[in-house]
Image (cartoon, grey):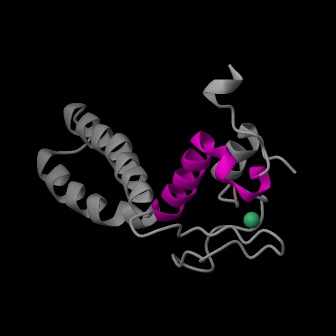
Amino acid sequence: MRVSLRQIVSRGLRGRCPNCGGPLLFDRGLRLRDQCPTPGCGLRWQRSAGYYLGAAVWNYTIVVVLVLPLVLLAVLGGLISQRTAYILAPVLALLLPFVFYKASWSLWMMSYYFFLPHELPANANELIPTRDDE
Ligand SMILES: [Zn+2]
């Protein structure tokens, strides 16, 4: 059964398997499963060495885009002192990557398969348009 781009995004935002919509990507805690546990799916989530870099980029982006502006606005708005910001910033920089770890993996899988949906096993038999088809 073909997986649409809408399904890929929906499943990615809910932390589900992009191929079958099966259970969450993680076993328990922060341990990423090797592949989807749904019978008949088996999508491998560690595709190759270095594949995790996409999740790391998402994690870094989430922390920088969300936290840095909030800390700057808090200091500029007088909500917190500069001294508090100097203490808060490194604490958040160390803590938040763990908080957003699962979300960053899910977002990485979603964005990867959003742009390469034909690599999902469910879409493997779909024809990929080529220049000859135009
Ligand atoms: Zn699956």
Give the x, y percent position of residue 123.
76, 49
Q: Is residue 70 magenta?
A: no
Write the residue at 71% across / 24% down: 133
Q: Residue furthest right?
A: 1
Give the x, y percent position of residue 80.
23, 44
Q: Residue furthest front?
A: 132
Residue 92 to residue 10: above or below = below
| Secondary structure mostly seen in the magenta stretch | helix
Residue 25 to residue 34: above or below = above
Report the quarter where the C terminus lies.
top right
- Seen in the image, is 98 located left or right of residue 83? right
In depth, the one of 13 and 20 nearer the eye is 20
Residue 27 to residue 46: above or below = below
- Seen in the image, is 73 located left or right of residue 12? left
Give the x, y percent position of residue 12.
64, 51
In depth, the one of 50 and 81 nearer the eye is 50
Write the residue at 53% across / 63% down: 102
In depth, the one of 37 and 99 nearer the eye is 37
The picture quadrant where one finds residue 130 is top right
The picture quadrant where one finds residue 5 is top right
Q: Quadrant of ligand 1?
A: bottom right
Write the residue at 78% across / 68% down: 41
Q: Is residue 118 magenta?
A: yes
Write the residue at 41% across / 47% down: 62
Give the x, y percent position of residue 50.
39, 65
What's the magenta region?
100-124
Residue 115 to residue 134: above or below = below
